[in-house]
């Protein structure tokens, strides 16, 4: 059976109207008051008059972006304006009020993120939880195509049943696949300019994200306020993975996230983007066709140095050391990063079977990629692999398998496989 592809135009104005309708009448104003009363906004924006604030936001909205430095924003800006105009229409309120509501939500979000990583008094009062997730990503370019993978680890959300007994896993598990499926219909959203961003596993030009592993730095630098031009959709313009990296560098302030991510394309280019708020580091794939990354560890010289320096500053100011509670993973992540490199370089063909071998690796803690934490493992080794994905960018195939709580680990479950239709051209 083949997939029916339906392409629909992106309509930011209509999306805005739909959002606005949910807040018709006085709801928008009530939410604005609540937002301005938040302790993070009250001393600054909350102390301005509503009228002055709304006028200020409106003038920001009406200032076009610098398209010499940021050419793509010339295409994005009309969309953002349309969305906010639609929002005002749907809510039946003036544009200035809709824009203010939208801005305050954004501003509070970036304040919260910044605060979470910088308020040492809050960190000392309630120390951060043990950094116990251990996501990893891999890229292999071989005869079966360009393959990306993501292994997702965190402490189990479900309570362990009392009868559960932990068993040591074998060194690794064989590859098992279910019969491939094809979606009946694939609905794709086409922006007014640029490419369809999500065509199965890649964009219209064959560029996609293989994984995103969160990684934060204590005492990070402030997040730039770029409203309304935040979250710039890079896949709307990226034609190759190198182009994506160039765009990411250009928009590092607009897209402020914190992670290690692998981006690749169907031509076999690949990059790891290492990112924390304002900063960015880029690692490119080498002639060996292998690239990998691990949560909590940055390898590019600039990001590695930044993380190290900030960790040491955090320790000095809090009186901790690198082996204490939440810091032990600073070391563990580097060990796991090294283990991944070792597995990637084994002569196993750089195909799906090789990728499966990497994702089912059960080396002793903390090297293991597939995690089977349980009641009999040490207190710091309670992580469970919740899910794993693989993508074949060249053929637009997606693989997935998930933990069946306390019954089967992902490595004991066959891969579910979805064949998306090939991208055009
Ligand atoms: Zn396993």
Image: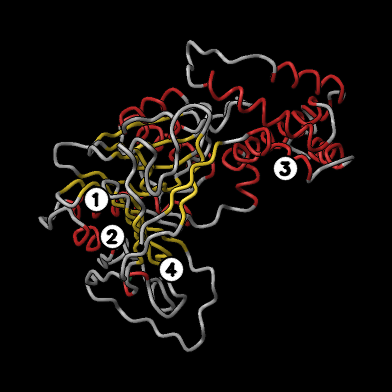
**CA neighbours of label 3 inside 10 A, class few (<14), some (14 to 19), many (20+):** some
Whether pointer 1 and pointer 3 mark residues with C-beta atoms closer than 8 Å, the reply is: no
**CA neighbours of label 4 inside 10 A, class few (<14), some (14 to 19), many (20+):** some
If you read the primary sequence from the N terminus, does the residue marked by circle 3 or circle 4 appear first? 3
Secondary structure beneath dot 2 equals loop
* Ligand 1 within 8 Å, label 2 CB: no
Secondary structure beneath dot 4 equals loop
If you read the primary sequence from the N terminus, does the residue marked by circle 2 or circle 4 appear first? 2
* Ligand 1 within 8 Å, label 3 CB: no
Residue 151 or residue 185, whichever sits in front: 185
Q: Quadrant of residue 308?
A: top left
If you read the primary sequence from the N terminus, does the residue marked by circle 1 or circle 2 appear first? 1
Label 2 sits on residue? 367
Q: Quadrant of ligand 1?
A: bottom left
Whether pointer 1 and pointer 2 mark residues with C-beta atoms closer than 8 Å, the reply is: yes
If you read the primary sequence from the N terminus, does the residue marked by circle 4 or circle 1 appear first? 1
Label 3 sits on residue? 18
């Amino acid at each position: 059976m083949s997939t029916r592809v339906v392409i629909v135009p992106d309509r930011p104005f209509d999306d805005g109207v739909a959002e606005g309708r949910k807040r018709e009448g006085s709801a928008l104003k009530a939410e604005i008051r609540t937002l301005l009363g938040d302790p993070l906004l009250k001393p600054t924006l909350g102390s301005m008059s509503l009228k002055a604030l709304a006028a200020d936001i409106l003038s920001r909205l009406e200032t076009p972006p610098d398209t010499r430095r940021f050419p793509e924003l010339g295409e994005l800006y009309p969309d953002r304006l349309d969305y906010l105009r639609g929002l005002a229409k749907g809510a039946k309120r003036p544009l200035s009020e809709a824009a203010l509501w939208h801005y305050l939500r954004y501003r509070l979000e970036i304040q919260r993120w910044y605060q979470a990583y910088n308020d040492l008094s809050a960190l000392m009062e309630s120390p951060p939880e043990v950094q116990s997730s251990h996501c990893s990503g891999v890229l292999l370019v071989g005869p079966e195509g360009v393959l990306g993978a993501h292994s997702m680890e965190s402490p189990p959300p479900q309570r362990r049943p009392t009868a559960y007994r932990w068993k040591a896993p074998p060194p690794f598990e064989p590859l098992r696949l279910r019969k491939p499926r094809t979606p009946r219909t694939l609905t794709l959203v086409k922006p007014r300019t640029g490419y369809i961003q999500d065509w199965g596993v890649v964009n219209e030009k064959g560029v996609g994200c293989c994984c995103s592993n969160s990684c934060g730095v204590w005492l990070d630098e402030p997040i730039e306020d770029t409203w309304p031009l935040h979250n710039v959709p890079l896949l709307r313009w990226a034609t190759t993975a190198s182009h994506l990296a160039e765009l990411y560098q250009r928009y590092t302030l607009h897209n402020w996230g914190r992670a290690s991510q692998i981006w690749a394309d169907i031509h076999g280019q690949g990059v790891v983007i290492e990112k924390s708020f304002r900063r960015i580091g880029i690692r490119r794939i080498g002639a060996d066709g292998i690239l990998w990354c691990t949560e909590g560890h940055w390898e590019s010289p600039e990001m590695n140095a930044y993380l190290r320096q900030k960790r040491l500053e955090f320790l000095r100011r809090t009186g901790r050391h690198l082996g204490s509670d939440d810091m032990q993973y600073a070391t563990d992540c580097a060990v796991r990063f090294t283990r991944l490199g070792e597995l990637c370089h084994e002569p196993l063909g750089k195909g799906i079977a090789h990728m499966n071998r990497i994702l089912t690796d059960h080396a002793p803690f903390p090297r293991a990629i597939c995690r089977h934490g349980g009641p009999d493992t040490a207190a710091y080794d309670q992580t469970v692999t919740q899910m794993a994905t693989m993508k074949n960018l060249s053929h637009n195939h997606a693989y997935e398998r998930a933990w069946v709580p306390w019954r089967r680990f992902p490595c004991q479950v066959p891969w579910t496989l979805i064949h998306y239709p090939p991208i055009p051209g």
